[in-house]
Image: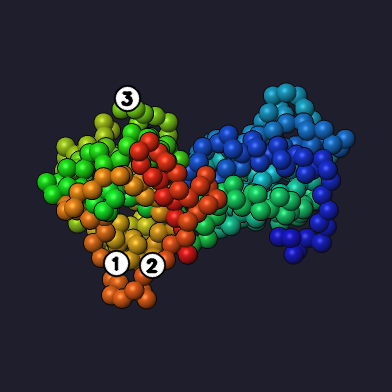
Amino acid sequence: TAAQNPISAFTAAEAAAMDTALEAALQGPRGANPLVGAVVVGPDGRQLVTGYHRGAGTAHAEADAIAAAASAGVDLHGSTMVVTLEPCNHVGRTGPCAQAIIDAGIANVVYAVDDPHDPAAGGAATLRAAGVSVRSGLAAERALELNRRWFQAVDAKRPFVTLHIAQTLDSRIAAEDGTSQWISSPESLADNHGIRNRIDAILVGTQTVLVDNPRLTARDANGDATGKQPLRAVMGLRDVPADAAVRGDDGKVLHLPTRDPRKALSVLFAAGTRHVMVEGGSRILSAFLAEGLVDELIVYLAPTLLGSGTPALNGLGIGTLAQAQRWAWDAASGGAVQFLGRDLRLHLLPE
Ligand code: AOF
Ligand code: ZN
């Protein structure tokens, strides 16, 4: 960490390389693993190779950069590795990056932020013990922001929770007869499916499966599956029917036989989920909100009225106004309020 590290000066070449590394990191997919980028700088300050992490199970950014150097015949002895996250110290699904850096003869490492993930942490110490000069803290804020939800999940040891509500002006998610397709505009649906591509898991209650029979896949306007698909999870005590659409062609669905949102989150976290979107119905949405387990709230508000039907929420255990949950508009990520076709998209964070 910066405190253990009295040398805090970074060269202009290192700062420029960190910009490149942060940009490269963005090419990776959002999900269970953090976005990480790495750039190797030669003794003359020239950027020799760039690497990034392409998602869980694939080479880490450092290994990707070192492999790029090997295939281009670039010698890395005496060079500086600039990376957005502390190089890992564990074997995991790929080799430890700290050892790969030592083996490549890299003399200096500059990284942005420590790896908070217990099994992976400790790379800096391993590098120092092998005589590599290590400095950290360069562009730390930008590197934290890059993986904000992932860092929050690893710190809390539970997935980051995005709660999604598609409702009418009068907060209904279905009409009296149960019909709910589609309250939201096509633009809202497309936005929601885009989010499904960037998360690890999507969670609904058994009631939603029985009533709406959703597929819970990320699809385009034609209904074709697009991009990375989230893990489909269903919580509740009732069984998921054998012919439920959520089982998909592969029949794969994670059933969490519990009504306790904390239990559901701990099973999901153990299964590798770092970001889950909770989509409904009322009981599940209310349970997560009542327990204070929601990190981000996305409401698609359709300019329609039903006057009766299923309310989005069915009680948060609040009896008096002083107990009201207070939420803050999130102005940072693309705007707290946004038109999506005829709908309004509201983006809120816990106050
Ligand atoms: C790095 N460089 O590019 C990434 C790191 O499941 P694994 O083996 O891929 O390990 C994932 C963990 O490794 C992840 O939780 C995080 O602590 C670290 N990710 N580390 O040195 C990388 N993506
Ligand atoms: Zn690694």
Q: Where residue 260 appears, x then y in whole percent?
A: 29, 63
Q: Residue at x 40, y 59 (%)?
A: 294
First of labels 2, 1 by sequence position: 1
The residue closer to the viewer here, 320 or 268, is: 320
Location of residue 136 in the rendering, given as x and y in whole percent from the top left corner: 73, 54
Give the residue type at disc 2: Gln
**Colouring:** rainbow
Q: CA distance from mark 3 to mark 1?
A: 37 Å
Q: Mark 2 and mark 3: span between their CA atoms?
A: 39 Å
Query: Closer to the camera, 136 or 336?
Result: 336
* SS for callout 3: loop
| For marks 2 and 3 on the same chain, the one whose residue lies earlier in the sequence | 3
Q: Is residue 80 above or below residue 294?
A: above
For this view, does 344 lie left or right of residue 73? left
Image quarter of the N terminus: bottom right
Tell me the number on the disc at residue 222.
Answer: 3
x then y, percent, for residue 165:
32, 50
Compared with 264, 226 (above or below) is above
Residue shown at 53% from the left, 52% from the top? 331
Identity of the residue drawn at 79% across and 43% down:
14
Label 3 CB sits under 8 Å from any ligand 1 atom: no
Q: Quadrant of residue 350?
A: bottom left
Tag 2 near tag 1, CB within 8 Å: yes
Residue type at mark 3: give it: Asn
Dot 2: few (<14), some (14–19), or many (≥20) neighbours within 10 Å? few
What is the CA distance from the residue labelled 2 to the residue labelled 1? Answer: 9 Å
Badge 3 or badge 1: first in the primary sequence? 3
Q: Residue furthest left?
A: 177
> What residue sits right under mark 2 in the picture?
325
Residue placed under numbered mark 1 in the picture: 316
